[in-house]
Image (tube, helix red, strand yellow):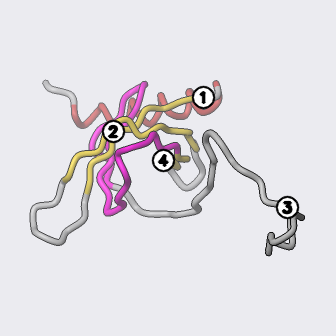
Amino acid sequence: MRLGDRRGHARFECRGQLWGELDLSKPVILQNIGPAGALVETALTTSQRSPHFALLSLQEDGPHLYVVVRHVTSASERPGEERHVFGLEFVRVSPADRARLDAIIGKWEEPHRLS
């Protein structure tokens, strides 16, 4: 400690990216899903200035997929309502989760197929 320095402990300067974690669970409306990603609607808000990573659980027992938020669009119809549509990209999908995801996509596409 220097003379005249009132800090009792060493102080360090941080440069670069600092990672943090937020444990937050919100229900979402699944609008669309495919092998590369999904569109979900929720009341969760986010900053569009930096990439966001999340863990998305499609069912109670999985698969649990790492996703990157690629775009956010407002879905609010009334003033003061905070609903957004998030474009999510699946990343680092394990082979087991890929198989479960493919099964979910198959079930999803069945009622949405054009005759």
Specify the label residue 112 is tagged with.
none
Mark 3, secondary structure of its residue: loop
Specify the label residue 10 is tagged with.
3
Within 10 angstroms of label 4, few (less than 14), some, or many (20 or more) residues? some
Asked if residue 115 is among those painted magenta in the image, a careful observer would answer: no
Residue flagged by tag 4: what amino acid is it?
Leu
Precedes in sequence: disc 2 or disc 4: 4
Query: Which quarter of the figure is the N terminus placed in?
Result: bottom right
Q: Nearer the viewer, residue 64 or 72?
A: 72
Q: Which residue is mark 1?
A: 92
Precedes in sequence: disc 1 or disc 2: 2
Marks 3/1: CA–CA distance: 39 Å
For the point 56% across and 27% down, the residue is 99
Q: Which residue is mark 2?
A: 87
Asked if residue 38 is among those painted magenta in the image, a careful observer would answer: yes
Query: Which quarter of the figure is the C terminus placed in?
Result: top left
Within 10 angstroms of label 2, few (less than 14), some, or many (20 or more) residues? many
Work out whether 7 lies above or below 51: below
Query: As drawn, is 24 to the left or to the right of 34?
Result: right
Residue flagged by tag 1: what amino acid is it?
Arg
Residue flagged by tag 2: what amino acid is it?
Gly
Residue ranking furthest to the left: 78
Tag in front: 3 or 4: 3
Marks 1/4: CA–CA distance: 16 Å
Mark 4, secondary structure of its residue: loop
Q: Which residue range is magenta in the image?
A: 29-53
